[in-house]
Amino acid sequence: MQDTNMVRNIAIIGHGNCGKTSLAEAMLYTAGKISRLGKVDDGNSAMDYEEEEIHRNISINSSFHHYAWKKHDIFLIDTPGDDNFLNETLFATHVCDSALFVVGAVLGVKGQTIKFANMIAERNLPNMIVINKMDRERADFNRTLDEIRGSLPVKPVVLHLPIGAENNFRGIVDIISGKAYLFDEGNKGTLKESEVPQELADEVALYRESLMENVADTDDDLIEKFLEEGELTEEEILKGLHIGVAKASLTPICVCSALFNKGTAAVLDSINMFMPSPTERPAKVGKVPGTGEVAERKPLEDQPFSALVFKTMADPYAGRLTIFRVYSGILKGDTFYNASKGTPERFGQLYVLEGKEQKPVETAGPGMIVAVAKLKETTTGNTLCAANAPIIYDAPVALQPVISYAVSAKKGDEEKLFSSITKMLDEDLTLRLTREQQTKQVLISGIGKVHLEVVGSRIKKKFGVEMELSLPKIPYMETIRGSARVQGKHKKQSGGRGQYGDCWVEISHLPGGGYEFIDSIVGGVIPQQYRPAVDKGIQEAMEKGVLAGYPVIDVRISLVDGTYHNVDSSEMAFKIAGSLAFKKGAQEAGLVLLEPYMNMVIKVGKDNVGDIMGDLNSRRGKVMGMDSDAKSEIINAQAPMAEIQSYATDLTSMTGGLGSFTVSFSHYEEVPAQIAEKIIAAHQAE
């Protein structure tokens, strides 16, 4: 077992196309964990190995690896940068001890960068920033650093100053030691010591002064010495910086070109030196099942075993893989206790994950990310622990779906499709499958259209069935605005047994009441056994609608009069009579079309508020109120469902990926006349 003090557990985080996966690849290659430097664009990287990831050139799942570097064991989680797969990053930040935050030197800070930085800040997660792609055209270290200072909730301290940029990016200056290093030829990631370029000498001195000031702030003794002597030793800077990073009060800045493996060795050294080990993180707090008492587990090997499951995935060879982070104790043997489900679980082999491969291990200790296959009861969010010391940790809460599509099988194999989607629900907690009672459509809901398209591609590959998406039908309703007294008469008496049913009903609006049937018959003009048939006929007619084929709601019916025939009357005849009476009465009482309105809570930056409000107006939306928190303006609004079916995509483009929203059903409202006419015309055309 590795000494827990020498373990590091890191999530690599950043906006799409900043080079996270390329950096992970370069780190693994430089550490000697993989034998060739793969490329995302060539589809041969160790971390992006799924067919869909290779096809789209993006990370879709969090992927896992580990490497050893200078006696340290580092466990890596490479997370997606696309908003459609934000939940993967959210869960990774919940279980890792620190974050390696990647920012591209060309694109700089984007909306998603700010979103991820806020995510890290909320968890007070120790972090380092790597400014990547320093070799690219228009790469600009100073501009990117200014954007980081101005936009992100971090206190950056420069560790490595780049020597050159774009094609001339050839080395770094280590600010702490004051030494320069040039990159070796051949993409090996190694460094050779050199002279600090004369033109950088003043800049290096300024950054060193700033670094010492920031480091001195982390410790009372250091600040005293710095104020007295104006200088800190290299050892004191290293110690103070480690303390500052562990507290998440300082963020070291490194530079590299991951694609050409330039500067990676210095990044690996910085991770070892400054990122905290599990033992430097606070004890994990949970509750004792049954009693609800608060309990904690320190990240030590002699504590009882405890772990949190944060991902479940289907592997084509190993089956269903359950991935968890060990918080305390040592896991060995073949059983553990699932405290969330209150049941013991037996497992076969324990694995550490290496991209698409799994490497068997005998034991796992604090800070390690490991997996087991084919568990029966365990799902994402469950706590695993020792049976004699049960504890339950808070599970990360999955993001709520914001976009829905009607889903069907392309070639009619509906049963196979829905069983396939059900299997995907275990793996992806942001996915929902529901049935819309009124429209009879099955809806699949997710974080964005790309998210659902990727689910479809995976289902096709894994289960051989094609999924088709279409915009869902809007569950409109109909109601009446006035009242009427009408007769419904069904008479068919030409030879043989006839049919005769005759009823008079009073129909009126019942606001918010759904449906009410009142039997007001006196004197037995319609026998008791036929009256429920009238009610049933009316309800069936209401279900089918009168105006445009949508269910009618909020109606009160009083059955007031009628006649019957001793021989020819029947339940069926009175059911038809009730139906006829309702259709006639509804038209006389004045039918209107209703549409569902949704509650929306939209979070955006101050700069976007005007655009969002203007857009909501164009969607017939109503702003109900404004609020704000430390980071966002919060718009509470209501809008018709028909107008916001693609809102997730539109909000992303309006806010540069910074906006987010949640949506829930509010109420029904009358459809404006000109829109209602189009809906009715479309129904009649069908």
Image (tube, rainbow, N blue to C red):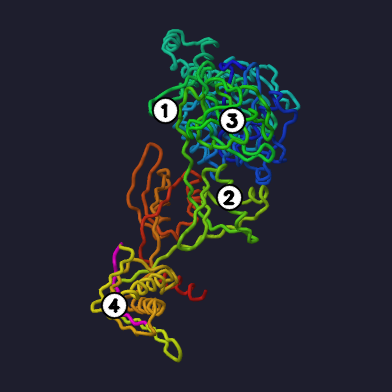
Residue at 50% across / 34% down in the picture? Answer: 382
Q: CA distance from mark 1 to mark 4?
A: 62 Å
- Asked if the residues shown at circle 1 and circle 4 are in contact, with their CB atoms under 8 angstroms apart, the answer is no
How many C-alpha atoms fall within 10 Å of the one at disc 3: few (<14), some, or many (≥20)? some
Q: Is residue 470 visible?
A: yes
Callout 4, which amino acid?
A: Ala
Label 4, on which residue?
A: 484
Label 2, on which residue?
A: 421
Callout 2, which amino acid?
A: Ile
Q: Which quadrant of the view contains residue 187?
A: top right
1 or 3: mark nearer the eye = 3
- Asked if the residues shown at circle 4 and circle 2 are in contact, with their CB atoms under 8 angstroms apart, the answer is no
Horizontally, residue 198 falls left or right of residue 654, namely right
Q: Is residue 300 above or below residue 512?
A: above
Label 3, on which residue?
A: 346
4 or 3: mark nearer the eye = 3
Specify whether residue 244 is painted magenta.
no
